[in-house]
Image: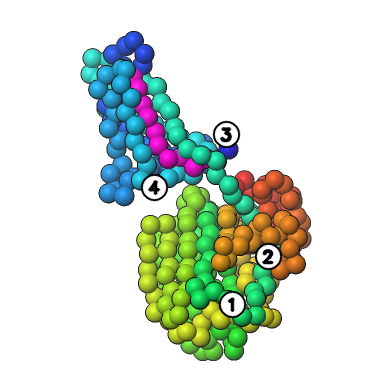
C-alpha cells in the first residue's frame, strides 16, 4: 500500500451478528511496526463506534493523516456479543518527493539575486531516530545566516549576523521516527514558525534572510559531519518550488554533492541530499 492521505473512517458491525465496537482508538503508521495514535484537535483520541451491526458510523478527520497503514484498537464493544467490525477508510493519493540522508552529501539550491516575493517561505516534512542534526542552512549578505537544527529532539532556529545570535526553539520529542511538519514564513520583520500544530511568531531584524545571488540554501559541507541530519525529508518547498523535484530534473539551480547516489522512484539520500547504497534507509 502506498502512502495515502486519509480523510475519514467508517465502521459497521459484523454482518448478521451481535458483534460490533462501541468505541475504538485509531492508530497510523508508515512502517507497520512504529505506530502513532490519531487525536482530534480537541485532544480526544477515542472514536465512538456502532450501536448495531448494520448502521454505518463515519468520522471525518479534522486533520488528515498521511500513512501506509491504519489500525483500530477496540476500547469497548457490545456486551452481548464479541469484538467484530467492518471498516472502510476514505482518502486520496498523496504526492510526495522524499530525500533520505545519511550524513555524507548535500543538496544546495541557488537563490535568485533579488527575491521578488514580499513573503518568503520554506516548508518541509522530516522524520528521524537521531536526536540531533542540521536540516537546513542559508547564508546571506554581510555574514548573515539562518540554520535549522534538531537538538536533543527539539528544533532550533539560529539567526546570526556577525557576533549577534538569536535562538528560537520549537517542539519536543521530534526524533520518534514519525513525520513532523515544519513551516517558516518570513515577511518584513517577523517570522511565523510552525511545527506540526504549534505556531510561534518571532520578531526579527529585517536584515535577516536576505540572501545574495552568490549564496545558497541547503546543507553546507563545512558543517561538521556529526551535525549532519540522518533521516528523511519530504516535500521540501521554497516559495512553492520543490527542491527535490528540481534535483531529480537536474535543474541548474540545484547542486548535489554526494559520495554514493541511488535515484529510485522517490528515495534520495542525506540532508537535502541523496541515499547511499550501503545504508538502505526506508522513508
Tell us which disc is closer to us: 4 or 3.
Answer: 4
Pointer 4 with pointer 3, Cβ within 8 A: no
- Give the residue drawn at x 40%, y 22%: 86
Inter-mark Cα distance, 2 to 3: 29 Å
Tell us which disc is closer to us: 2 or 4.
Answer: 4
Residue at mark 2: 107
Label 1 Cα crowd, 10 Å radius (few <14 / some 14-19 / many 20+): some
The quarter of the rendered structure image containing the N terminus is: top right
- Give the magenta-colored segment's residue range: 3-13
Dividing the picture into quadrants, the one containing residue 250 is: bottom right
Label 4 Cα crowd, 10 Å radius (few <14 / some 14-19 / many 20+): some
Label 3 Cα crowd, 10 Å radius (few <14 / some 14-19 / many 20+): few
Inter-mark Cα distance, 2 to 4: 31 Å
Pointer 2 with pointer 3, Cβ within 8 A: no
Residue 224 appearing in the image: no
| Helix, strand or loop at mark 2 | strand
Query: Residue 1, which numbered label?
Result: 3
Residue at mark 1: 115
- Give the residue drawn at x 62%, y 59%: 242
What is the magenta segment's predominant secondary structure? strand
- In the image, residue 164 sits, relative to residue 60, either above or below, namely below
Inter-mark Cα distance, 4 to 3: 21 Å
Query: Residue 63, which numbered label?
Result: 4
Residue 9 falls inside the magenta stretch: yes
Amino acid at each position: 500500500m502506498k502512502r495515502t492521505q486519509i480523510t475519514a473512517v467508517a465502521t459497521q458491525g459484523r454482518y448478521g451478528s451481535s458483534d460490533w465496537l462501541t468505541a475504538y482508538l485509531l492508530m497510523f503508521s508508515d512502517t507497520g511496526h512504529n505506530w502513532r495514535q490519531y487525536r482530534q484537535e480537541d485532544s480526544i483520541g477515542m472514536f465512538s463506534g456502532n450501536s448495531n451491526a448494520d448502521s454505518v458510523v463515519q468520522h471525518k478527520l479534522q486533520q488528515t493523516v498521511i500513512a501506509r497503514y491504519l489500525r483500530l484498537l477496540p476500547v469497548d464493544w457490545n456486551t452481548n456479543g464479541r469484538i467484530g467490525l467492518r471498516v472502510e477508510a476514505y482518502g486520496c493519493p498523496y504526492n510526495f518527493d522524499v530525500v533520505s540522508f545519511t550524513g555524507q552529501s548535500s543538496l544546495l539550491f541557488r537563490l535568485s539575486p533579488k527575491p521578488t516575493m514580499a513573503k518568503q517561505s520554506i516548508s518541509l516534512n522530516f522524520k528521524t531516530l537521531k536526536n540531533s542534526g542540521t536540516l537546513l542552512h542559508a547564508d546571506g549578505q554581510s555574514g548573515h545566516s539562518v540554520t535549522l537544527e534538531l537538538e536533543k529532539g527539539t528544533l532550533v532556529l539560529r539567526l546570526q549576523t556577525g557576533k549577534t545570535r538569536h535562538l528560537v526553539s520549537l517542539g519536543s520529542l521530534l526524533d520518534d521516527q514519525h513525520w513532523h511538519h515544519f513551516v517558516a514564513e518570513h515577511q518584513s520583520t517577523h517570522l511565523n514558525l510552525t511545527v506540526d500544530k504549534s505556531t510561534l511568531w518571532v520578531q526579527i531584524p529585517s536584515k535577516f534572510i536576505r540572501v545574495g545571488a552568490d549564496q545558497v540554501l541547503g546543507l553546507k559541507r563545512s558543517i561538521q559531519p556529526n551535525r549532519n541530519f540522518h533521516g528523511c525529508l519530504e516535500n521540501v518547498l521554497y516559495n512553492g518550488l520543490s527542491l527535490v523535484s528540481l534535483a531529480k530534473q537536474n535543474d541548474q539551480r540545484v547542486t548535489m554533492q554526494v559520495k554514493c547516489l541511488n535515484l529510485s522512484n522517490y528515495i534520495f539520500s542525506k540532508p537535502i541530499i541523496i541515499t547511499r547504497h550501503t545504508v538502505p534507509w526506508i522513508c
